[in-house]
Amino acid sequence: MARAFDAIFFDLDGTLADTAPDLAAAANRLVVEHGMAPVPYEKLRPVASHGARGLIGAAFGKRPEDPEFPALRDTFLNYYEADIAVHTRLFDGMDEVLARLETDGIVWGIVTNKIARFTVPLVAAIGLTPRAAAVVSGDTTAHAKPHPAPLLHAAAVSGVAPQRCMYVGDDLRDIQAGKAAGMATVSAAYGYCGDAEPPESWGADFLIRHPSELLRLLG
């Protein structure tokens, strides 16, 4: 039987790797320095895919347009960069998925809105740099997701036509980007997913609640 896809690309935070513990730790270090009580992890986890904007918003109630935001963001990012992979791990079952892709000769890569300053050391720290066919950061192309440019770049670098690719993500913008790029899309409902529209409503081609469910989609 001919396989359905020649490449699978993954969002990073909340899809491929559970990065929320280290992001939350950086946010709470900042919170404590401002004389406040640490924010419960359960409040920070859902916004982890939105980086500094989401975490500063949840921890301090500040938005990017607030005058205090830039200083909070810069300090948060410095703290995160210093301890970027202390607790970060691949989601349970994801390493088996990647091994299966590699065994079957299916290309895989990473497309994230995280900028290269953080993507490159993080991907290296969790041992994926030599395995990924493409690692596309939020500043690799002129546009970030939900624009399709990063996904199209990943497909081009990997030498695979977009229509033969699948994109897996835990945020609505991931599904929007994948659809705009002409790829099959998968909502990762086990990820962070935010607190707005549920993943069932994103219009993805598939929805999974555990990484291992990807294996049945490979064809």
Image (tube, rainbow, N blue to C red):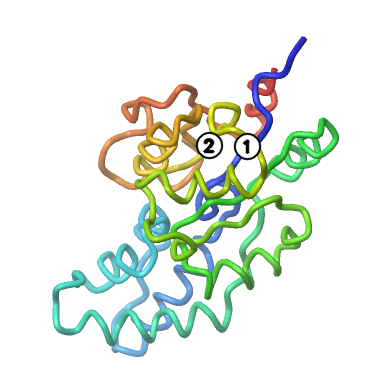
What distance separates the C-alpha of mark 2 from that of mark 1? Answer: 6 Å
Residue 64 or 148: which is nearer the viewer?
Answer: 148
Categorize mark 2 by other alpha carbons within 10 Å: few (<14), some (14-19), many (20+). many
User: Looking at the picture, does residue 184 appear above or below residue 174?
Assistant: above
Identify the residue at image location x=47%, y=63%: 114
In the picture of the structure, the residue carrying the numbered disc 2 is 167
What quarter of the picture does the N terminus occupy? top right
Q: Does the residue at mark 2 contact the one at mark 1 (Cβ under 8 Å)? A: yes
Most distant residue in the top direction: 1
Label of residue 23 in the image: none
Percent position of residue 93, x then y: 70, 40
Q: Earlier in the sequence, mark 2 or mark 1?
A: 1
User: Looking at the picture, does residue 158 appear above or below residue 20?
Assistant: above
Residue 99 placement, left or right of 59: right
In the picture of the structure, the residue carrying the numbered disc 1 is 8
Identify the residue at image location x=39%, y=61%: 142
Tag 2: residue type? Answer: Tyr
